[in-house]
Image (cartoon, coloured by chain):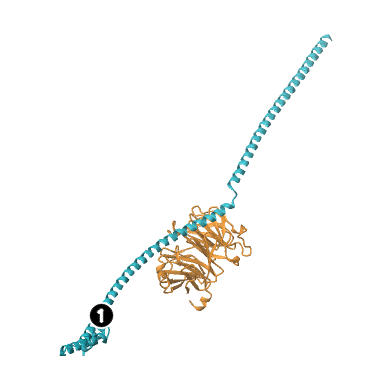
Chain colours: A orange, B cyan
Amino acid sequence: MEQRHLLHCTVYSSAVSACGEFLAVGNNFGDVSVLDFNLKSLSSSKPKLINCFSAHNGPVYALLGINNTLISAGLGPVLIWNWKDIVSFDPKPVHKLEACGPKASITCLCYDKKHGLLFAGIEDSSIMIWDLSNLSCCKKLTGHTQYIHDICLLSDSLASASEDGLVKIWDTHNNKCTKTIKPSNWNELKRPSLGSWIGCVASDSSTEWIVLGGGPAPALWHTRSTSMALPLNSSNEAQSFIPFTLHFYGDEIVGGGNDSMLHRWTSNGEQKAAVPCAISNIFSINFASENSLPAILTGTGHKIQLFTNLGYEGPCISL
Amino acid sequence: MSSDDDVIRRRLLIDGDGGGDERRLNALMKLFIKWCNSPEADNSTHQRMLSFLAQSEFAMMKSSFVYEMNTKQMDKYQCLQEEIDKNVALAHEEIEKCKKELEEARLVRKNRQQYDALAGVVLKHPDRRKTEGQINELDEELKDLQASELQLIEKLDLRKKQFHALLTSIHQLQSVLKEEEEQENQEGVVVDEVAMETSESNG
């Protein structure tokens, strides 16, 4: 990439191929860069940039690696690429899924392996569902009033976090909204100076617990009773910590946000560690394969940071 | 020439002590020859020869002891190495076991923490006994109210029936009075008619 581009680059999303060999990252210019990412030789050699191609006309907000395909979403239709194609030059997408009008872009993607459904949250406050087996659009979930920041799959349901401050839990069978959570109503969480928007939602493997973060302070919630269990504590001066991405990893909760640190919390909300890293605002945290290190952090800037151990920083790769 | 090199090489390799032994043996040989050639019995030479012999034997015994010591040391080191290898293997197994235990412990800890979190949520709700007590109270109140409702309905019915009875008797009285009035009117008409007839017949 040109030097000028590097200075203004923001990496919004990342995805690892199923075989674990390649890492794809999407940035704000609409390009997807593919890196050669051999897990075993991480200590000896840094991953190298193999290919960089233009995917969308707008920023690539979401990437998802499924089987041997890569799904990229941003402005315009959702594109499905083969990993084999994108490691060579000038690939063409295998499929295109029409989403919505030309103005709105897709902000987040989620895949249900069991039913082969792809969920996408869109800026126009709706959620589209595609059936990937026949590449057709199933349904559209409407209910939010402002754009959707993040979606997360629960057992038989989908949680969506939106700018309007609501987290809605939808039943994926009859496509109705079953529960609504408004974290800014809780006194312990609300931070009026930051607003009521919810930026990220994640659930643990048993889907009994979800974490929500955004304007209100990040907290652990119990899904079935939609009651707030515990706020995720941060250090004292971090009353302004806004997580942009949260994940459950092993027995802890991992999150990155606007204070250039990777935060780790135990399953009952106590802060375990805050590891400083090289990225000032972390927009996405990805793990190599479901639950194994290294963790890949991307955000503002053209650097991607790998964490081979969640306790300390790892190598930085520059696009 | 190569044989010279070989000899030199052999000499340098084999000669452990260097000049000492070689010199002694040569001196011994010279003494022996001198002793054989000397006409009279030469005790000092004899003694010297014996001492040379003893020294050489001593050197030989020393080197054989050193050799034995070295072999024994080697054996010991071999044993030590085997033991260490065994311990390393054991330690590996221990590490594997501990890793598994760690995983289990992590899972247990995660479950405990989630349990704590859930307990926190549960505690925020009021006590079950209290709510059950409240429910029972409300139930009783409801039953009381229902019973009083039934009573009031019965009373209402009774009053309605009483009013009905009252009204029917009023109506009956009214009709009786009317009949009597009519009867009286009729009798008056008949009397008038009779009076008129009589007056007509009289007049």
The amino acid type found where label 1 is placed reads Phe
User: Residue B74, position in %: x, y?
Assistant: 30, 73
Q: Quadrant of residue B161?
A: top right
Count of marks placed on residues = 1
Q: Is residue A222 visible?
A: no
Residue at which label 1 appears: B58
> Which chain does the residue under circle 1 lie in?
B
User: Residue A278, position in %: x, y?
Assistant: 52, 72
Label 1: element kind: helix
Q: Which residue of the protein is positioned furthest toward the right in this rendering? A: B203
- Specify whether A237 is left or right of B36: right
State the residue in front, A152 or B133. Answer: B133
Q: Residue at x 27, y 84 (%)?
A: B17
Q: Quadrant of residue B203?
A: top right
State the residue in front, A205 or A44. Answer: A44
Q: Residues within 10 Å of mark 1 (few under 14, many from 20)?
A: few
User: Residue B89, position in %: x, y?
Assistant: 36, 65
Instruction: Locate the N terminus of chain B by quadrant.
Output: bottom left
